[in-house]
Image: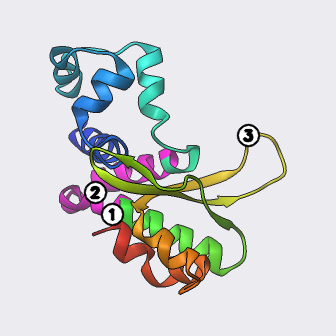
Amino acid sequence: MNDIYIDLIISTIIENYGSEEAFYEDRLGVSPYRWQNWKKGRGNLSPEEMQKIKNLFSDYEWMLLQKVLRQTIIYPEKRMIAVSEFRRMKTKIARQWLNIGLATVEILDTKEENNYGQYLDMGVTIHYGEWGFDDIINFRLPAYIQQQIDNEQVALLDWVNDKLEETYNS
């Protein structure tokens, strides 16, 4: 199993679930032993379990993950920064889409309180008008930005331009 692939998946799991355990126990329903074996390349997950892992990412994010993996093969020096590069490119692409008027941005969930704090999900989407073909980049962000936007201290698009990269990558 490619270590960079695993690192990117684990980073996204922690971003969305707070811990690996919460994901593999609650979402996948697999034992810690089976999960560790899969991560080490000594065991397989079922197609359904692998689909749940892939569903952590939008189609566009999955394609971006593949590009980052390829870059780490071509440029081995990028291996140590693959996760941060993936996150940085998500923010850069989303801002570019928005700045040229290609995409829309929306808060997908209002504040969600869990054991790991308060979060909200934001999506940047290019709509093609064809079912299932939209390109989407999702971000899980601290809920305090909702107050900034609700209080009209800053418009959502302005916030994305000024603060997304700093907030998401910190």
Q: Which residue is mark 3?
A: 132
Number of other residues with Cα within 10 Å of mark 3, as a class: few under 14, some 14 to 19, many 20 or more = few
- Give the residue at x 26% y 38%: 6
* The one of 143 and 84 positioned closer to us in this rendering: 143
93 up-or-down from 82: above or below: below
Amino acid at pointer 1: Glu
As drawn, is 74 to the left or to the right of 57?
Answer: left
- Quadrant for the N terminus, please: top left
Over which residues does the magenta segment extend? 62-86
Q: Which residue is mark 1?
A: 85
Give the structural element (helix, strand or loop) at label 2: helix
Amino acid at pointer 2: Ala
Amino acid at pointer 3: Gly
110 up-or-down from 24: above or below: below
Discs 1, 2 touching: Cβ within 8 Å? yes
The disc at residue 164 is none
Q: Which residue is mark 2?
A: 82
- Quadrant for the C terminus, please: bottom left
* The one of 22 and 150 positioned closer to us in this rendering: 150
Q: Nearer the viewer, mark 1 or mark 3?
A: 3
Q: Residue furthest right?
A: 129
What whole-number distance in Å separates the C-alpha atoms at marks 1 and 2? 5 Å
* The one of 114 and 10 positioned closer to us in this rendering: 114
Q: Main secondary structure of the magenta part?
A: helix
Please identify the quarter of the rendering in which residue 75 is found.
bottom left
What whole-number distance in Å separates the C-alpha atoms at marks 3 and 2? 28 Å
Give the structural element (helix, strand or loop) at label 1: helix
